[in-house]
Amino acid sequence: MKIPGIVQSLAVILLCAHAASPLFAQGPPYQTDDPVPVDLHHYEFYIFGSADGTPAEMDSTGPAFEFNWGAIPRVQLHAILPWGVIAPSNNPVYLPAGTGPSAFGLTDMELGAKIAFIKEGKHMPQIGSFTMFEMPTGNFDKGLGVGKVWYKLPIWFQKNTGKWLFDGGGGYQVVPQANYRDFPYTGWLVKRELSEQWELGAEIFAHGREGYAAAQTERSAMIDVGGYYHFKHDTNEQILFCYGHSFVGQTENYAYVGMYWTWGKDDKGGSPGDKKDLTTGMLFPGPPRQNGFGWSGQ
C-alpha cells in the first residue's frame, strides 16, 4: 500500500525541523511513542481513559489498565486490558461508516514488546521498535473488537538536549479484517521539563485511512498538547493528560487522562518518558548518555 501524501509531507517537514480504531495512546499520554524500555526489574502501571473520534463515530476507552515490565536488559513487555464504548453517529452522510448501535464492553487486549536497538550518542538518536499484537478479546458482532489478531509495527527515535526531549518515528498498522485497511502512521513529539513537578509537550500525529469499520475513515493529521504532573510526596506517582484536534484531513479529536505509577529495585521516580536504565552490561557499546534518559554510563 502506498503511503498517503499527507503522511509523507509531514514526515519530511518534521525531519527537517528536527535535522478496529487505535484508541491507546502510544506513549502515554501522547500518540507518539519512544524507544526507551522500562528499566530492568522495574514496572509501570497506568489507569486511564481515552477518546478518539470523528464525525462518523466516537470511540472511547475506559477504564483501561496498562502494565509494563522491564523483563530483560533493553526489552520491555507490555499489556493493556481495556474496556470501551463505541458510539456511531448513524448519520447517512458517512455511509457505509458510522452505523449501528452504541455498545460498551471489553475491547481488544494489547500485548507488545519494546526493544532498544541503538543507544543514543552525541549525534545519534536512540532507536528502537515497539511491536504490538492486538488480541481479539472484544465482541466483534457489537463492534467492540476487530475479530482477528492485528498488529502495530513502528520504529521510534529519541534525542535529548538539556531539558528538551524529541521523540519521533512511525510505523504500519496491519488489520487483516473486512472493512478495515492497513495504514501507515507517524508521530513527532517535543517535550520540556518546566520544573520538578511539571513537564509539557506537543506533538504532530498523522495516520492513513483506517477503513469503513473504524471511526477514522479518512486520513488525518493532528496537533496534540499534554503533559505530566509529578506529585511532590512521591515522584513515582503522576497525572497524565493530553488533548488534540486535527488540522488536516478528516475532523478528529483525541483525549487522554490517566494516573501513572512506577517502582523497582532502586525505587526512584521519573516520568513515563524519562526512564533510566540501571542494568549492568551493555548490549550495544557506545558513549554514556549525558542527560540520564534511558541509558546510563556503565
Image (cartoon, grey):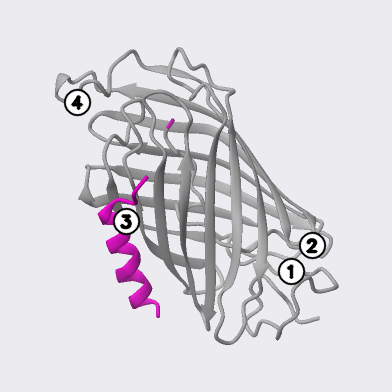
In primary-sequence order, the first of circles 2 and 4 is 2
Disc 4 versus disc 3: distance between alpha carbons? 23 Å
* Dot 2 amino acid type: Pro
Q: Quarter of the image containing the C terminus?
A: bottom right
Q: Are marks 2 and 1 in contact (CB under 8 Å)?
A: yes
Which percent across, then down, holds residue 34?
A: 55, 61
Crowding at mark 4 (Cα within 10 Å: few <14, some 14-19, many 20+) = some
In this view, 279 is above or below 55: below
Q: Position of residue 45 (x, y in %)?
A: 66, 46
For the residue labelled by badge 2, is the local secondary structure a helix, a strand or a loop? loop
In this view of the protein, which residue sits in the foreground, 9 or 288? Answer: 9
**Vertical arrangement, residue 170 with respect to residue 93, above or below:** below
Residue carrying label 3: 7
Residue 195 in percent (x, y) is at 51, 74
SS of the residue under disc 4: helix
The residue stretch that appears in magenta = 1-20
